[in-house]
């Protein structure tokens, strides 16, 4: 069965520091990969997505993610975190053979001044 | 465009009551989805639809029903509410192309007492 793992339940970083959120997936082929952000009481907003091609993808709000096939990973990065980045982050996998999407359990980000 | 809208935003039900969560999208998307989000569990797919008149079960369909009579609307029905259905429910939609992005509604917070 397909699965998405986000090993870090909660991360705290200082404002201005760099950030990396981890995501690993289990799937036989290369899936479609997504990162979403959810602010408290809000729906999910797409940060970036990977379907094919360049393995380093740029997203909104200064985020980027790198697909590493050998590690089955799609880690999210940001060079300098802002206080407004505090939120819940979800990695998701879409199967190119079907219509369903699978989400990780999320990583909660706290930003301290 | 309003995107994906959900009503109500909040609801409290008693055990055994029924209700319908409404979802409407104005993007002419073929695909629509219902997810539930439990604390620490990420999003789980309840039902999805690939077009008007076509629905299919996701990971956690028990206790729910859906219908898709129009492209725009995808209501989720709870017939006999149970405490286990206390959750936040998100509706999402996407276009017909496999690489299209999912767009999420703001969510409905449901409590069953």
Image (cartoon, coloured by chain):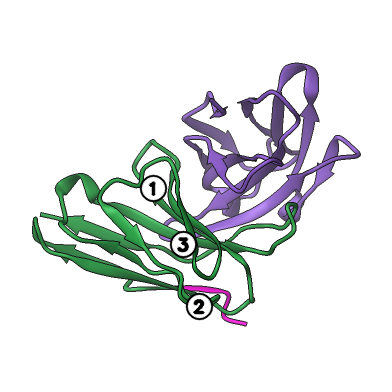
Mark 1: few, some, or many residues within 10 Å (few <14, many ≥20)? some
Q: Is residue B12 left or right of residue A78?
A: left
The region drawn magenta spans B1-5
Residue lying at 52% horizontally and 35% vertically, measured from the top left: A104
How far is disc 1 from disc 2 in space, using C-alphas? 26 Å
- To which residue does mark 1 refer? B37
How far is disc 2 from disc 3 in space, using C-alphas? 15 Å
Give the number of the disc on residue B11: none
Is residue A75 in the magenta section? no
Vertical placement of A105 versus B58: above or below?
Answer: above
The colour applied to the residues of chain A in this rendering is purple
Determine the secondary structure under disc 3: strand
Question: Tag 2 or tag 1, which sits nearer the N-term?
Answer: 1
Determine the secondary structure under disc 2: loop
Is any part of residue A112 visible from this angle? no
Vertical placement of A98 versus B52: above or below?
Answer: above
Residue lying at 57% horizontally and 50% vertically, measured from the top left: A37
Residue closest to the far top: A70
- To which residue does mark 3 refer? B91
């Amino acid at each position: 069965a397909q699965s998405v793992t986000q090993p870090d339940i909660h991360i705290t970083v200082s404002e201005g520091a760099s950030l990396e959120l981890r995501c690993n997936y289990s799937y036989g082929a290369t899936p479609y990969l997504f990162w979403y952000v959810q602010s408290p009481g809000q729906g999910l907003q797409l940060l970036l997505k990977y379907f094919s091609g360049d393995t380093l993808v740029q997203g909104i709000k200064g985020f980027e993610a790198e697909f590493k096939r050998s590690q089955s990973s799609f880690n999210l990065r940001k060079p300098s975190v802002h206080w407004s980045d505090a939120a819940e982050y979800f990695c998701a996998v879409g199967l190119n053979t079907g219509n369903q999407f699978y989400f990780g359990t999320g990583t909660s980000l706290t930003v301290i001044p | 465009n309003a995107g994906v809208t959900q009503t109500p935003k909040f609801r409290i039900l008693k055990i055994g009551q029924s209700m319908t969560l409404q979802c409407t999208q104005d993007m002419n998307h073929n695909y629509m989805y219902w997810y539930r989000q439990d604390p620490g569990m990420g999003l789980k797919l309840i039902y999805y639809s690939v077009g008007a008149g076509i629905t299919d079960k996701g990971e956690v369909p028990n206790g729910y029903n859906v219908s898709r009579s129009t492209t725009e609307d995808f209501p989720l029905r709870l017939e006999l509410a149970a405490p286990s259905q206390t959750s936040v429910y998100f509706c999402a939609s996407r276009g017909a192309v496999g690489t299209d992005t999912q767009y999420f509604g703001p969510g409905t917070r449901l409590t069953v007492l």
